[in-house]
Amino acid sequence: MPDSVPQRFSDPAALRHCMAAWREAGERIVLVPTMGALHRGHLALVAEAQRIGDRAVVSIFVNPTQFGPNEDFSRYPRDLEVDLARLGEVGTDAAWTPTVETMYPPGFASRIEVVGLSEGLCGPFRPGHFAGVATVVTKLLNQVRPDVALFGEKDFQQLRVIQQAVADLDIGVEIRGVPTLREPDGLALSSRNRYLSPEERAIAPKLHGVLAEIALASRNGTGVAGRIAAGRAALEAAGFRVQYLTVCDARTLAPVERVDGPARVLVAAFLGRTRLIDNLAV
Ligand code: PAF
């Protein structure tokens, strides 16, 4: 197993210099944007980056602009040394670890809004979240200028928002989604799973169970409303506070009554103080 410390950059000029040298050498650069607290899901993205490219670059930046005032920005897990060691174990080429001051210097005044795709699902529950994501990802893409950037499908709405922003703004990078990695009991891997108490952790896989039932039942073209109502009731009975549970068109994210094309069943729910999201292809 490779075990070398990735080249670490905190200065944009040094990062650009290195990326330019790799590009000039004809190397294909693949970026994995993260907020750290790396788990097996992130390492699977790095493995995919290594499979499809010559250089795997991971950014680690807990982006303040995508957290609402009552969200978990201050308690979001941060352990850069552990993250860098993990990246070293899997042979990552470079880690881009900018500070908040580097990303948002005094006078910073721009924001990328992706209308439509940002407005449903998590949008009303997390005002400003997707503008924060689209803005920081645009910056990361401009800083690294990768050929491809990889994002987990667990944040499916985020993936669609970023794909739209990149297409609309002619950023010239391929955005690829990578299937969600799960625990053996179905719980999607997430940095926020560590907030769950043992009791909540035991209940949490129910989220995936309900999604799987709805996905299976929706495949045969029957209406989805009854299945969703039953799934929501089952989750509430197990102790979740459901924000949304819905079947959407996989491209537009508009809710569908009946599945007759690519679709996705998506959920967001609180378990105690922890907000979990997940989704499955129908
Ligand atoms: O999915 C995440 O970890 C973040 O939203 C991202 C894409 C790194 C932007 O901060």
Image (cartoon, rainbow, N blue to C red):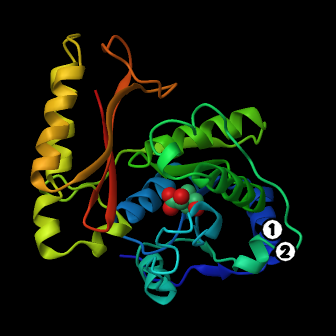
Which residue, given by chain and number where applicable, does mark 1 sit on?
Answer: 16
* Figure quarter occupied by ligand 1: bottom right
Residue 20 in picture, x, y percent from top left: 81, 62
* The label number, if any, that marks residue 13 in the structure image: 2
What is the C-alpha distance between the residues marked 2 and 1? 5 Å
Image check: 259 left or right of 171? left
* Up/down of 85 relative to 39, above or below: below
**In contact (CB < 8 Å): disc 2 and disc 1:** yes
Numbered disc 1: secondary structure? helix
Nearest the camera: 145 or 165? 165
Q: Is residue 88 visible?
A: yes
The N terminus, quarter of image: bottom left
* Up/down of 147 relative to 58, above or below: above
Residue 228 in picture, x, y percent from top left: 22, 29
Residue 119 in picture, x, y percent from top left: 56, 37
- For the residue marked with disc 2, what is the amino acid? Ala
Nearest the camera: 11 or 235? 235
Image check: 103 left or right of 93? right
Quadrant of residue 44 within the rendered picture? bottom left
* The label number, if any, that marks residue 205 in the structure image: none
In the image, is the residue at mark 2 within 8 Å of ligand 1 by its beta carbon?
no
Residue 255 in picture, x, y percent from top left: 41, 24
Residue at image position (47%, 43%) is 177
Q: Is residue 32 visible?
A: no
Residue at image position (16%, 67%) is 200
Numbered disc 2: secondary structure? helix
Image check: 256 left or right of 203? right
- For the residue marked with disc 1, what is the amino acid? Arg
The C terminus, quarter of image: top left
* Up/down of 224 relative to 112, above or below: above
